[in-house]
Structure formats: structure tokens, C-alpha cells
Amino acid sequence: MDSNWNQSPSTRMTRPDDLRDVTMPLILGIETSCDESAAAVVEGPDAVRSSIVATQHDLHERFAGVVPEIASRAHAARTLPVIDEAIREAGIELKDLDAVAVGHTPGLIGSLLVGVSTAKSLAWSLDIPIIGVHHLLAHLHAPALDDDPIEFPALSLIASGGHTALYRQMDSLSATRVGSTIDDAVGEAFDKAATMLDAGYPGGPAIERLAVSGDPNAIDLPIPKAGQNRCDFSYAGLKTALLYAVRGHPVGRGRAARFPRAVSELTHEARADLAASFQRCAIAALMRGVAAAATEGQFRSLCAGGGVLANSELRRQLGTFAESHGLKLRVPPLRYCVDNAAMIAGLAAIRLQAGLVDDLELQASPRQPIAPPVG
Ligand code: KG4
Ligand code: ZN
């Protein structure tokens, strides 16, 4: 992933007379980057008036992972109904909106296109600005929803199904990456571990549930380390170590190689021990990165976002770390950890207040570095 700043070509500074009063704008957020179709209405940066999330877990469960084609078709069917519900629950009408915001990068391109096209149609028909929001920055804004603003500088951790990275943030609209995974994301590792242990779908919560009755020190798995950068992460090795611990070392070579046992031959206790041991190592690797990054600057807050922040053991360890390092811990409530549109609309209010809006040229992009807050 590229860490250079790169301004979205459609972003422009607004002239003051372009906008209505933007001190507390009412913004509709739309989020369709992966497997949740979400819409929300937020007033200003943090007052959530409604937040509706239609998850697609039922559609992807039998494939044990998100199937992009199925995800985009489901977004096409569900996005307008969730918008209707968000507007109704907020007690407003479409004409009351000051802007429409959409998560336009990163994500699955077919899924992003549904959200971006919907947002463009609404912005055009209501004659209001469209604001493209970077999904990862939105996750880092989530702790401010229904809560106080984040105090900067912040050391910020993203831990989700597609991303694992650490950033230094001086404000909500920008982030400088200090480390990231060199292979799998931590959420992806949780999802694969759940498949290996036949624990259920989605994987993260399933592993956490199974781990509750297990001994985290029962199995000697590696706490994975990346290469040169102390703030980088790596999860591929832990995943392979877990596979061998579950199924034994493969016997034979090449295509004839076979695992000596199936997961169905393990007792529930053995599977719980494996889940707890995996969770211990996956979280230890995250905490090691956080500890390394904390030495690389002066921070007031330890901020974190992304689906893996739903994990209570990770939240507990971040809390202990923040307290012992004099940092203010900012982790979103569970409803704003996983993908949602309130984080999109809330961050869009800060962009709007800074005069940063997009136009109908806004592009969906599967990956794009976080854009700097300049017009
Ligand atoms: O942020 P998110 O909703 O979507 C992405 O942008 O990727 O994160 C989803 C990820 C999945 O990998 C899921 O297994 C993980 O977050 N997750 C968890 C937990 N709840 C969700 N991982 C560990 N423990 C959990 N309780
Ligand atoms: Zn996400």
C-alpha cells in the first residue's frame, strides 16, 4: 500500500456562498464498501440521529468469506431501503439534508460503486454537495460519535477485516502511517482461524466466543513479527502455525500431501484452547505494534477503530496500555466498531466545515491513500 499523500481529483474548496449554514449540517452517510449496506443521518460531526446497518452475513456464510459479486448485488437491493429507514428514523425529510456523504475508498469496487452512484444521484437531485470519505479515516472518527471530540495528536490503530495499520494523526482529516501489516489483516486472520476451527461465521466474534472457555496458554503459537519496522504486523505465519496445530503437520509431498487429522476429531475443549491461544497471539502482536509506535512521538490519545475492536480482550488490553502511558483511550462503542454509515457522515461534517466537498466526478476506488485536508 502506498503511504504518499494523494488528493482525490474531484475534491475542491467550496466558495462560502455555495453552502447553507454548515455549523451543524445534517448529513446523510452511505457506506457500501464491503458486506454491510448502511445509511445514517448525523448532525454535525458527532450527533447521530439514525444509523441503519443491513448486514449480509447470511449471504456469505456458506462461502466462509465475502463473495464480491454477491455483495454488490445485495447492496443494489438494500441501499435505498436503508436510506429510507435512516431518513425516517432521524425524523427528517430528504429536503432537510445539507449534504450526502459516501465511503468511496478503499473497498470492493463493485460494492463501492453502488454507494457512490446512489450518493451522486441524491446529491444531483437534491442539489446539495456530495462528500467522499475515506473508509479508514471514518473508522478512526467513530470514537467521537455520540461522544467528545478526539484530542490530537493521536496514535491511531485500524484493525479490521481488510486493514491493520498504525497512524499518527494531528486532526481527523489526515493520518500518517507509521506501520501496517505486510501480509494478512488481523480480522482476516480471525476469519481464517474460525474456518480452521469450524467455529462459525463471521469469524472474529466466533473465535472470541469459543476462546472464552479455553486456556490462552495451552498451545505454543508464535506471536508474529514483521521485518525491519517495529510498527509493522504480519499474520501469515500465525495462521499457518494454527493450521498445523489444528490438523497436524502435512504428511507426503506436493499434491499428495495430506493432513493427519480433521478438525472434527478435536474435542470442544481442544478447539477452545486453540481459539484462546490464537487470540492471545493475534492481540499480543497488535499490542506490540502499539507499544512500539507509542515511543515514536508525543500523543494525547490512543484511538482505535475497525471491526476487530469489537473484541473485548483487545479493548481491555488497549485500556490498560493507555492508562499506564497517560493516554486517553478512544475506542468506539460496539455499534460503531463494525462498518456503519454514521462514521462516514460524521467525518463528512468535518470536511464540510473545512470547505472540502466533492463533485459528481467523485470516483469509487478499491484502494487510495488517505487524502490530505487541502483543497
Ligand atoms: O471494519 P469491519 O466491519 O469491516 C472491514 O472494513 O473489514 O471489520 C470486520 C472484521 C472481520 O474480519 C471480523 O471477523 C472482525 O472484524 N471482528 C472481530 C470481532 N468482531 C468482528 N475480530 C475479533 N473479535 C471480534 N469480536
Ligand atoms: Zn471497515
Image (cartoon, helix red, strand yellow):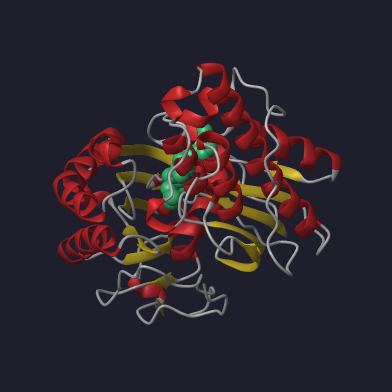
Residue 364 place in picture, x, y as percent: 30, 69
Quadrant of the image occupied by residue 85: top left
310 vs 304: above or below: above
Query: Residue at horizontal 49%, vertical 72%?
Result: 369
Query: Residue at horizontal 63%, vertical 43%?
Result: 282
Q: Is residue 23 visible?
A: no
Quadrant of the image occupied by residue 147: top right
Residue 312 place in picture, x, y as percent: 61, 30
Q: Is residue 119 visible?
A: yes
Residue 252 place in picture, x, y as percent: 47, 50
Left or right of residue 167: residue 262:
left
Query: Residue at horizontal 43%, vertical 50%?
Result: 257
40 vs 125: above or below: above
Residue 280 place in picture, x, y as percent: 67, 36
Left or right of residue 326: residue 278:
left
Query: Residue at horizontal 45%, vertical 23%?
Result: 265
Q: Toward the viewer: 21 or 92?
A: 92
- Number of callouts in the render? 0
Left or right of residue 5: residue 134:
left
272 vs 47: above or below: above
Q: Toward the viewer: 46 or 197?
A: 197
Q: Toward the viewer: 351 or 312?
A: 312
Left or right of residue 2: residue 341:
left
